[in-house]
Image (tube, rainbow, N blue to C red):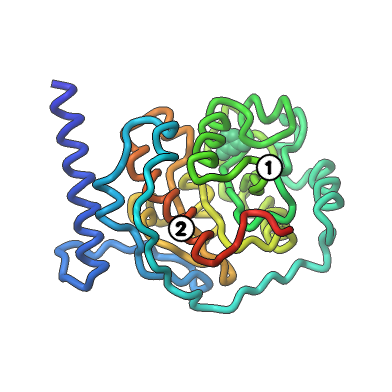
Amino acid sequence: MEEVRGELRDIVREARVMLTRARELGARGPVARSPAPAPAVQPAPVTESSRSARTLALPGFEEFASNRPAVPSFAPDPVAITFEPRADLPLTLPELASAVASCRQCGLCETRTQTVFADGSPTARLVFVGEAPGRDEDAQGLPFVGRAGQLLNKMIAAIDLKREEVYICNVLKCRPPENRVPAPEEVERCRPYLEQQISLVKPVLICALGLSAAQALLQTKATMSSMRGKTFFYRGVPVIPTYHPAALLRNPGLKREAWIDLQRVRDLLRERNESAVAS
Ligand code: URA
């Protein structure tokens, strides 16, 4: 019975992908789902291809690296990129990390072991933004080092990059107790740090890992199912939302869609003829 349910879920997901594709091609679909991003965020045309959906390897990311669909074309940015670092915050990443380390802007400073600023290359073309540190990250002071981090490493490898070539950070720099979802006020208190990080790294592409990251970056309350498969813009930088690795661990069936998203990440980076790290 569970197997039949799983198959039905896969069929429904496949149908959604095809419907998205049909809308992409200009066909009329019965459902008009779109997120309600803040004015600064302009959605771009969907680039997900049904061909990608058909050529997927399942279910582990280790199989994905050998599975290469055609490169889709990508819409140009609708607005100019504006990396304007804030003058009232440190203007280098190490200084910003120090400021974060002594931050007492919200109650999470009482329960954290240490702040978790970032990992990876400060000149990366691709930035991954997660939700908040978990127990392992709080203990080690680095983002995505637990089970979800192991999967993120595989996701990064599947798009032919190394963890050291991308920049990895979180919306929150402190662990919420029991790994609860960040409170809106915590997100707002921490937002300037994330925005300054992005302004200083100057990526060409951001991948938002999970709902909290996508909602925080795009300042929207839209659902993940309405956002994924589409590209949005944060200050002119494309943002591709996808499932959080922890969600993929809980529900491996979602890896299929996550892989489609990752291929778009990879293809957009390639299309811009950029490597993941500035030389
Ligand atoms: N989950 C996140 O969102 N970030 C981390 O750093 C680890 C787990």
**On residue 96, which mark appears?**
none
The residue depicted at 57 percent of the width and 42 percent of the height is 131
Question: Against 273, is 65 above or below?
Answer: above
The residue depicted at 71 percent of the width and 34 percent of the height is 142
Residues at marks 2 and 1, CA–CA distance in whole angstroms: 19 Å
Frontmost residue, 208 versus 57 = 57
Position of residue 174 measured from the top left corner of the image (x, y, whole percent): 69, 38
Q: Amino acid at mark 2?
A: Asp
Disc 2 C-beta below 8 A from ligand 1: no
Q: Is residue 47 left or right of residue 39?
A: left
Question: Against 70, is 112 above or below?
Answer: above
Query: Which quadrant holds the N terminus?
Result: top left
Image quadrant assignment for residue 48 = bottom left
Ligand 1, seen in the image, is in the quarter at: top right
Instruction: Identify the residue under disc 1.
Output: 164
Between discs 2 and 1, the one toward the N terminus: 1
* Neighbours of disc 1 within 10 Å: few (<14), some (14-19), many (20+): some
Position of residue 117 measured from the top left corner of the image (x, y, whole percent): 73, 43
The residue depicted at 67 percent of the width and 59 percent of the height is 198
Q: Amino acid at mark 1?
A: Glu
Instruction: Identify the residue under disc 2.
Output: 267
Is residue 32 visible to the viewer in this orientation of the structure? yes
Frontmost residue, 42 versus 149 = 149
